[in-house]
Amino acid sequence: MPIKPTARSVRAAASLTGNLMLAPAVIAMRMPMLAAEAQSHNPYRVETTRAVTEKMSAMVEGALAAQMAFAYAAIQFWPEIWSGRTPSLLSGAAADRAMRAALKPSGRAVKSNHRRLSRSI
């Protein structure tokens, strides 16, 4: 029997999707800055460095969050069996939670970049 999503999880998924859909706009706003930095002789390329480091930190944070979600599902395996529920590791709920946890840091980074870059236009 499929699990019916709650209103809270639907709102969270919509928010994450909305944040990630800002990525093309962020790329479009960032490209002129990156092109200007590439042509300058300044060794301190602030926007380029920021672009790389925030992507790496979001990736690491997302990977850690996904691992933590799977670790929690593994810890809950036997209690779920003993309570008569299907374990989330087997039903796919753990994978869904891990995927959402992995994408959340990227969504936050894209949203903050969009906010920051929109102010500079």
Image (cartoon, grey):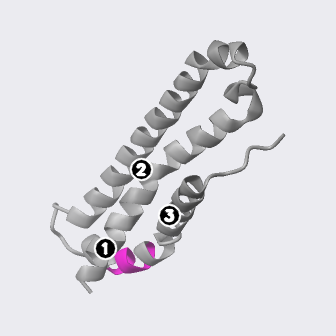
Badge 1 marks a residue whose secondary structure is helix
Q: Which residue is mark 2?
A: 105
Task: Look at label 2 and name its amino acid.
Answer: Pro
Q: Which residue is mark 1?
A: 115
Badge 2 marks a residue whose secondary structure is helix
Inter-mark Cα distance, 1 to 2: 15 Å
Task: Look at label 1 and name its amino acid.
Answer: Arg
The span shown in magenta is 27-32
Q: Earlier in the sequence, mark 1 or mark 2?
A: 2
Across and down, in percent, residue 61 comes to 40, 40
Closer to viewer: mark 1 or mark 3? 3
Across and down, in percent, residue 66 comes to 52, 35
> Is residue 28 inside the magenta stretch?
yes
Residue at image coords 59%, 25%: 73
Q: Residues within 10 Å of mark 1 (few under 14, many from 20)?
A: few
- Tag 1 near tag 2, CB within 8 Å: no
- Relative depth, front residue between 7 and 16: 7
Q: Is residue 34 visible?
A: no
Task: Please give left or right for residue 17 compared with residue 36 in the image.
Answer: right
Residue at image coords 57%, 27%: 70
Q: Give the vertical position of 20 relative to 71 (above or below).
A: below
Across and down, in percent, residue 115 comes to 31, 73
